[in-house]
Amino acid sequence: MYRALTRDIEVVVEPFYLEEQSDPEDDRYVWGYRIVISNNSGVAVRLVNRYWNITDQNGVVDEVTGPGVVGEQPRLSPGDTYEYSSGCPLDTPSGLMFGHYQMETDEGELFDVDIPAFSLDSPGLLRVLN
């Protein structure tokens, strides 16, 4: 698992290879990832936007931005946890993802919360952070 802590908001990522959706002979490699966001701060926050930097093993970068996650903009009160799963296809057998969530307090303050860099490695490859 990979962890990042920003302003007492913890983001934990657990990536996993989706063999049943992958087809290496067709250069299609698919990973899922589970993310748990824990608000350990003293203020409520809403996840309003996301930013992802996805880099394959050839250094090709895909940047993804948009509102919320998986169609939601969850509000986390102090002590709340939010969990979701999503996925990422690549044309190469390994890659790297990192990013941030833009959060907003009830008072309208916007700030970024880091998503830790995590490695996407096909089974059988040496597992390293690219």
Image (cartoon, grey):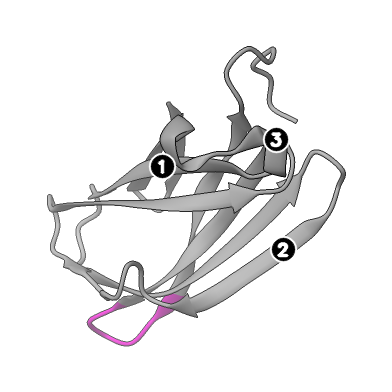
Residue 53 rendering spot, x and y as whole percentages: 66, 58
Pointer 1 local density, CA inside 10 Å: few below 14, some 14–19, many at least 20 = some
Residue 29 rendering spot, x and y as whole percentages: 61, 40
Please state, as top left, top right, bottom left or bottom right, where the C terminus lies in the image: top right
- Asked whether the beta carbons under mark 2 and mark 1 sit within 8 Å of each other, the answer is no
As drawn, 116 above or below 65: above
Please state the extent of the stretch shown in magenta in the rendering: 105-110
Residue 69 rendering spot, x and y as whole percentages: 35, 68
Going by the numbered disc 1, the residue's amino acid type is: Tyr
Q: Is residue 65 left or right of residue 74?
A: right
Q: Is residue 130 left or right of residue 84?
A: right
Q: Who comes first in sequence, dot 3 or dot 1?
A: 3
As drawn, 87 above or below 34: below
Instruction: Name the residue that disc number 2 marks.
Output: 62
Question: Residue shown at 52%/60% (left/top)?
Answer: 100
Q: Nearer the viewer, residue 124 or 5?
A: 124
Q: Is residue 68 left or right of residue 27?
A: left
Q: Who comes first in sequence, dot 2 or dot 1?
A: 1
Give the distance between the C-alpha atoms of the residues marked 2 and 1, in whole angstroms: 17 Å
Find residue 33 and name its label.
Answer: 1
As drawn, 95 above or below 83: above
Question: Residue shown at 80%/38% (left/top)?
Answer: 57
Question: Residue shown at 36%/74% (left/top)?
Answer: 68
Going by the numbered disc 2, the residue's amino acid type is: Asp
Pointer 3 local density, CA inside 10 Å: few below 14, some 14–19, many at least 20 = few
Give the distance between the C-alpha atoms of the residues marked 3 and 2, in whole angstroms: 22 Å
As drawn, 81 above or below 19: below
Find residue 25 and name its label.
Answer: 3
Please state, as top left, top right, bottom left or bottom right, where the N terminus lies in the image: top left
Question: Residue shown at 86%/47% (left/top)?
Answer: 59
Give the distance between the C-alpha atoms of the residues marked 3 and 1, in whole angstroms: 23 Å
